[in-house]
Image: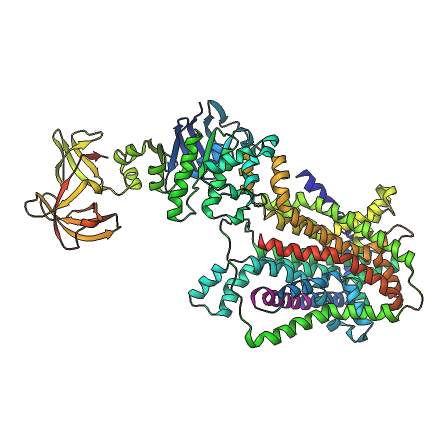
Amino acid sequence: MTSVVIRGLALSFGEQRVLTGVDLDVPASSTTAVLGPSGCGKTTLLRLIAGFLAPDEGTIHLGGELVADATSSTPTARRRVGYVPQEGALFPHLDVAANIAFGLARARRRSGDRVGDLLELLGLSPSLAKRFPHELSGGQQQRVAVARALAPDPAVVLLDEPFSSLDSGLRADTGRAVLQALRATGATAILVTHDQDEALSLADQVALMGGGRIAQAGTPRQIYQAPVDRAVAEFVGEAVVLPAVVSDAGATCALGLVDVQGPATPGAASVMIRPEQLRLGRSQGAQLVGRVLDVAYHGHDASVRLRLATDPGEGVDVVARVDGATAPSPGDLVGVSVQGPAWVV
Amino acid sequence: MALAGLVVLLALVPLAFVAASTVSTGWDEARRLLLRPRVGELLANTVRLVLGAVTASAVIGTAAAWLVERTDLPARRVWTALLGAPLAVPAFVNSYGWVSLTPRVEGYGGAVLICTLSYFPLVFLPVAATLRGLDPALEETAASLGLGRWRVLRRVVLPQLRPALLGGSLLVSLHLLAEFGALQMLRFPTFTTAIYDQYRSSFNGPAATALAAVLVLLCLLLLVGEQRARGDRRLARVGSGATRATVRHRLHRWTTPALAAATALGVLSLGVPVASLGFWLLTGSPTSFPVAALASATAMTLGLAAGAAAVTVLAALPVAYLAVRYPRLATVLLERGTYTANALPGIVVALALVTVAIRWVQPAYQSAGLLVMAYVIMFLPRGVVSARAALAQAPPLLDDVSASLGTSSLQTFRRVTLPLIAPGLASGAALVFIAASTELTATLLLSPIGTRTLATAFWSSSSSVAYGEAAPYAALMILVSIPATYLLTRQARRFARA
């Protein structure tokens, strides 16, 4: 039963406070994505867990064992962490098999049975075993790097933006293969990323970082549908945020009276609606009507920016996400309706 | 850190010796010794020799590297080997080759010519290696921004070559400051030859030490200049994708002139000394070859050079490691400290060691160990430069990964760092081996009584104008350097490819 427990972790580089008090729990055998914009301190957090850095304040427990606090820090080599850096960083002088077996004891390195298993687990052909890192594609390099990290059965696997150097098609495939491998081995993993799609689609838990602390941690669904504040809401996806007046009946905003969820107290508030909650239809007979300003067509869907033309929200701009095939054209007049509740932020 | 400190301390012994003797000489005496027309003349000679030969080496070395690496010059591999090969011919053998043909090479022009021909590979090799490793995408981007071929060269390629070019030029200038044999033979007096003559006439006179102090000052000036020009960028990088091969410039009608220029360079730097040597080998010696003397000198040379190479690389590693991994003022100063000995003429290093040995470690005096120590001090910069370049191939990230896999730092060094830097260290050992097997000045003073190396045997014959008698020693000297030179050029290739 292994988990990561982090309390009050803080670290400064000189004058610059990078982490200001991070609390995070990672349940055993699950994947947590640490999501945040670049420079938010997420890589620093990972390096602290790995033991490459020591914290100024706070504690890190791995599997119930204290590995770092303000006064002492267990060396990386004794923490049993698997580390997968951004560029894979395979040992250039070793072939794939030797790279994967690197962390194993000498006897097991010789036998080589683990290498075959891990290659298979990561969906790599056994014929790659004798290749050298420079003979592999970027996606293959990353898979080998993950196999290498998994080989010694680490307490936790740390992945630092492992897919960001891959092109988009490869990224999704590699991400899936890696996550499958992590689940199959029952590993606990922390994945650092700035890509919200990656975080939401791959992880069991998403921890959103901002300003040197964890702004919110929860399931992908909680993070997306019930963000704690506007910044979280806007980082994990497009959001329509409108001023509203909350009453027992719901929230009255530019879109009329809508249902609300979240920490609602009567009075003035802001509500958040995801663009896919707005449905577009014919303008005749519609209560809410808007004129289409522009359309960003993505194939599978389209983002439609429109300006409301009816009270109470006349002149307010909102964004709707609709099926790509039925997207209106700029200038069209469309009817607008709201599906599901708004979230008070 | 302690280890590196010890190495640097050893490297600074000659400098301390010079400083201590200068101080004990006293200010007035030093001023009397230095403010002489003769010193001004020596300073002018030294400076114009360094300026002339470094400029020529930089231009020729870079142009040759560009031709070999960036154009469709025919037989490029041959040229790479051929243009690196002059390193195997010691400068004093090169000048012997020229002087024994025509006395007209004596003086400034000849000194610049022969020093350039001997030392331009020190620029050629690193610049060629860098050119090979450059990402062509940068040049293509520059071209897409509307820069013509020459402006791409000037604004994109040359700035990236700067570390290699500066490093190579620094090596050339340090060699020139310490050069003795070639310049003595060409009758072009510089500080180093003057110090030698002073020592010869008045064993360890204050005049010579005062001159050496000026020379050390020049060296320090160069080091500071190079450090400033280079800045302190960290060059380690892990590439994930393979870099594409460069598109080579087509020479078209310039093919023949380019080939002619490369051939001329090869003939002048390698052909002349080799041909001259061959001539003297065939015609010069009236008696049969002194086989026993040749064999014992060869064995002596091989043993000393191999010992020096091994010890130097071991000593250079901790110094370079600190400077690369922990670039702070203290570590950079440590690294730079090792360079100073290179600009001290071999004879100063030798006399410093003689003095120290006689005063404190009597049994070491007149031992092979002391001579090896002199070699280590003198050639430590070569070891450090190579170890530094080698360590750039082993980025710290790999250490992190290794630690995360449960490997102790000692194990990480053995299993990750060492295999990655071994080729670079081998290059360093080869460089030291070549230098030690052809070293003349310190060897003249420190070799145990009754033993001769190839260099000292060659020198005693050629300075008494017995050109024929000297020839076999020179030929052997080149022969023993060939394997190391080959290793070096091959390593330079592999380095750039990795």
Verify whether residue B70 appears in magenta.
yes
Residue B237 coordinates in the image, percent (x, y): 53, 49
Residue A148 coordinates in the image, percent (x, y): 51, 37
Residue at 65% across / 54% down in the picture?
Answer: B491
Q: In this view, does A232 lie to the left or right of B140?
A: left
Q: Is residue B168 above or below residue A14?
A: below
Verify whether residue A40 appears in magenta.
no
Q: Give the range drawn in magenta.
A: B52-72
Q: In this view, does B18 lie to the left or right of A170?
A: right
Which is nearer the eye, A49 or B268? B268
Which is nearer the eye, B189 or B100? B100
| Residue B459, quarter of picture | bottom right
Q: Could you tell me which quadrant the N terminus of chain B lies in?
A: top right
| Residue B204, quarter of picture | bottom right
Tell which residue pokes out farthest to the left in this image: A285
Report whether residue B110 is seen: yes
Report whether residue B237 is seen: no
Residue A215 coordinates in the image, percent (x, y): 34, 34
The coloring applied to the image is: rainbow
